Image: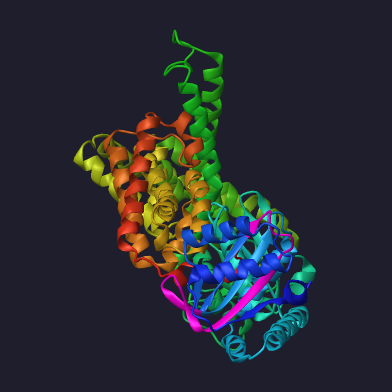
């Protein structure tokens, strides 16, 4: 389908008579009725006027695009009115009016073509041609010519894409839910802009998707690895790649792709250049830091630990529903189902998550040989009372000791390498980790845990309010970034000590930003563009599911107003949660775990709602009101 299919010369009007907006609408709808495109002029005109009452369809540049869908429209079309005298359209004066008429059951192809015509109007040269055209034939020809120009440009882009360079990559974040896919989409969009072919593998919570093949890697001209957790980069063999945090790929895809394309010609200070050598030689890094490595290893461990924590917490909470002592065979409340859920949650999942944390921190540092020392060290931390913090130390100790032993034994003849990797390395590394945990770390770490536990349990009133505000405020601040993850790690450490108040405050801090943004787009429509209001609808679901990242686009667009609003709303909700003694035995899951894992579910929902309302009100009072043209931003890309 092309422009000819939706444009009729009979529907083009040139008139310099003085008229107001309603007179222009009447004139254009009448023409459509006269030419047989609209059978019920009154119903279509009512649809157009209804849309105008919601918000003016003047989009700037002296252009208005009124539109409507009605059962009275027989065939999708556009009627065009040129008036050099100018028509008052809302707060603007327009000279070109493109009225779009679409049947109620319009097919997508027609609507795409109509939207395409609307995008033509964003071209300054094209608008100038229309304004200087003297006849209907000239306007019609200008439209057909513009369509051909755009078609040629699209053909050129397609040709460039098919013959252009090939970008591949891997993205992986801690939870594998939001940032993983946002980074992949950001890189893909950047590749599209450049006319590049692309394939980004996502290591998400449900497994690997869009997996890279040997052929993809062989053909790649640029490779990006965007991750906060460890990923297997050995598949790239001797190929060079750019290694960045997930957030950088989301925020600065242009810089990242530029760096990937220019490998071998120079480096930037803040992006690592990594070359994986054959035969498992050490990775060479430029611009890396201990903090970056530490963060990656921690997040790798936490990402594997979270399912154990969530499952264990929910199962324990379910067991409590039968009675607080219902899982104890000696109790009068004893119930076999309570015992079953408590066994899975408390005696299985909860005893495993610290060893799993330690194992995968160690794996992140030393690969497969680090698993056994890390997991055994983590189990010793759990049994010895040093808990989450001890497990972290065991993971790092296991990883670096294993890596050191591996390095020192790499020159042993290949014949013995199998025996070395299966027996000697894990045996020696585990001995060192076990010795340190048993004789050195467990006692002081256990005492530190007891101190923190006693301190947090003694909190009430104002001290609990302050702690809840700090944790939830940190959670709301960078929406999945390092500050958010630091607060989350503290909450998990307390969770391991069976202190569940911080978990409740943290989840408030994670749910409030997307929910607050969603409410603001509903209450203060004139402060957000059409595109933002549409995005706000999705944030209801994301916020309810405890996916904070839904608020990121709003924070990126207006950080000085959105981030403080998020922090204040989240902090107040989290502070109230801890002050009221609310606990949550499942640190993830959003609204789905509140009924079974929260001790005061109604009060807790109230805290979330209070934080949400506060964030929305701050956004409403601080964001400026948009003009009609700003409101309709992106409208031309998809109007009806």
Residue at 29%, 50% in the rendered image = 470
| Magenta stretch, residue numbers | 69-94
Q: Is residue 70 magenta?
A: yes
Q: Which residue is found at the position 55% from the left and 42% from the top?
A: 307
Q: Is any part of residue 473 visible from this angle?
A: no
Given residues 542 and 584, the one toward you in this image is 542
Give the total number of marks visible in the rendering: 0
Q: Residue at x 51, y 76 (%)?
A: 271
Rendered-image quadrant of the N terminus:
bottom right
- The answer to whether residue 579 is seen in the rendering is yes
Percent coordinates x, y for residue 498 in the rendering: 39, 34
Q: Closer to the camera, 153 or 296?
A: 153
Res 164 → quadrant:
bottom right
Residue 345 pos. (x, y %): 52, 30
| In this picture, residue 187 sits left or right of residue 529 | right
Residue 164 placement, left or right of 240 = right
Residue 68 in the image: x percent, y percent?
Answer: 61, 61
The dominant secondary structure in magenta is strand
Residue 346 or 363: which is nearer the viewer?
A: 346
Where residue 370 appears, x then y in whole percent? Answer: 58, 53
Residue 433 counted in the magenta span? no
Q: From this view, report whether residue 60 is shown above or below residue 280.
A: below
In this view, which residue lies farthest toward the left? Answer: 462
| 257 or 572: nearer the viewer | 572
Q: In the image, is residue 596 above or below residue 449?
A: above
Farthest residue toward the top? 332
Quarter containing the C terminus: bottom right
When the figure is inspected, residue 346 is found, relative to residue 529, above or below; the finding is above
Q: For this view, does 252 lie left or right of residue 384?
A: right
């Amino acid at each position: 389908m092309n422009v000819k299919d939706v444009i009729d010369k009979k529907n083009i009007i040139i008139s310099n008579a003085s008229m107001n907006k309603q007179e222009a609408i009447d004139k254009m709808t009448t023409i459509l009725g006269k030419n047989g495109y609209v059978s019920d002029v009154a119903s279509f005109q009512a649809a157009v006027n209804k849309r105008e009452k919601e918000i003016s369809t003047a989009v700037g540049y002296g252009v208005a695009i009124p539109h409507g869908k009605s059962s009275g429209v027989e065939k999708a079309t556009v009627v065009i009115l040129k008036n050099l005298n100018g028509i008052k359209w809302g707060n603007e004066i327009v000279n070109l009016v493109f009225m779009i008429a679409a049947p109620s059951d319009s097919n997508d192809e027609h609507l795409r073509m109509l939207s395409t015509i609307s995008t033509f109007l964003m071209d300054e040269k094209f608008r100038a041609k229309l304004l200087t055209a003297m006849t209907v034939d000239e306007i019609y020809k200008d439209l057909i010519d513009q369509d051909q120009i755009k078609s040629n440009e699209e053909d050129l882009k397609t040709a460039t894409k098919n013959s252009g360079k090939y970008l591949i990559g891997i993205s992986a974040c801690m939870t594998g839910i939001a940032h993983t896919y946002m980074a992949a989409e950001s890189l893909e969009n950047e590749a599209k802009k450049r006319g590049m072919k692309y394939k980004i593998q996502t290591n998400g919570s449900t497994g690997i998707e869009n997996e890279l093949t040997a052929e993809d890697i062989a053909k790649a001209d640029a490779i990006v690895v965007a991750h906060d957790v460890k990923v297997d980069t050995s598949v790239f063999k001797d190929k060079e790649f750019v290694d960045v945090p997930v957030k950088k790929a989301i925020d600065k895809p242009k810089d990242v792709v530029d760096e990937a394309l220019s490998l071998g010609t120079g480096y930037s200070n803040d992006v690592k250049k990594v070359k994986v050598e054959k035969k498992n030689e050490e990775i060479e890094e430029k611009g890396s830091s201990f903090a970056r490595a530490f963060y990656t290893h921690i997040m790798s461990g936490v990402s594997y630990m979270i399912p154990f924590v969530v499952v264990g917490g929910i199962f324990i909470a379910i067991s409590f529903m039968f009675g607080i002592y219902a899982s104890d065979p000696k109790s009068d409340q004893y119930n076999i189902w309570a015992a079953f859920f408590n066994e899975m949650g408390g005696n299985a999942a909860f005893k495993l998550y610290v060893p799993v944390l330690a194992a995968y921190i160690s794996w992140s540092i030393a690969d497969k040989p680090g698993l056994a020392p890390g997991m055994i060290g983590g189990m010793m931390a759990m049994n010895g009372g040093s808990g989450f913090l001890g497990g972290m130390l065991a993971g790092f100790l296991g990883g670096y000791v294993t890596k050191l032993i591996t390095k020192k034994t790499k020159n042993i003849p290949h014949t013995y390498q199998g025996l070395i990797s299966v027996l000697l390395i894990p045996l020696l590394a585990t001995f060192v980790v076990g010795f340190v945990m048993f004789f050195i770390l467990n006692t002081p770490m256990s005492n530190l845990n007891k101190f923190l536990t006693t301190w947090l349990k003694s909190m009430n009133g104002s001290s609990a309010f302050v702690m809840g505000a700090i944790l939830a405020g940190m959670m709301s601040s960078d929406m999945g970034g390092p500050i958010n993850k630091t607060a989350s790690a503290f909450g998990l450490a307390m969770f391991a000590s069976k202190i569940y108040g911080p978990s409740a405050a943290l989840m408030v801090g994670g749910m409030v930003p997307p929910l607050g943004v969603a409410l603001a787009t509903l209450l203060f429509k004139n402060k957000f563009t059409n595109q933002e209001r549409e995005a706000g609808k999705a944030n209801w679901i994301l916020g309810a599911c405890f996916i904070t990242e839904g608020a990121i686009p709003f924070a990126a667009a207006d950080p000085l107003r959105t981030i403080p609003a998020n922090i204040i709303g989240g902090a107040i909700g989290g502070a109230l949660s801890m002050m009221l003694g609310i606990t949550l035995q499942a640190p993830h899951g959003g609204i789905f775990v509140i009924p079974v894992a929260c001790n005061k579910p109604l009060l807790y929902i109230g805290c979330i709602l209070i934080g949400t309302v506060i964030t929305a009100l701050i956004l409403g009072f601080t964001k400026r009101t948009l003009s009609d043209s700003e409101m309709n931003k992106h409208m031309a890309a998809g109007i009806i």
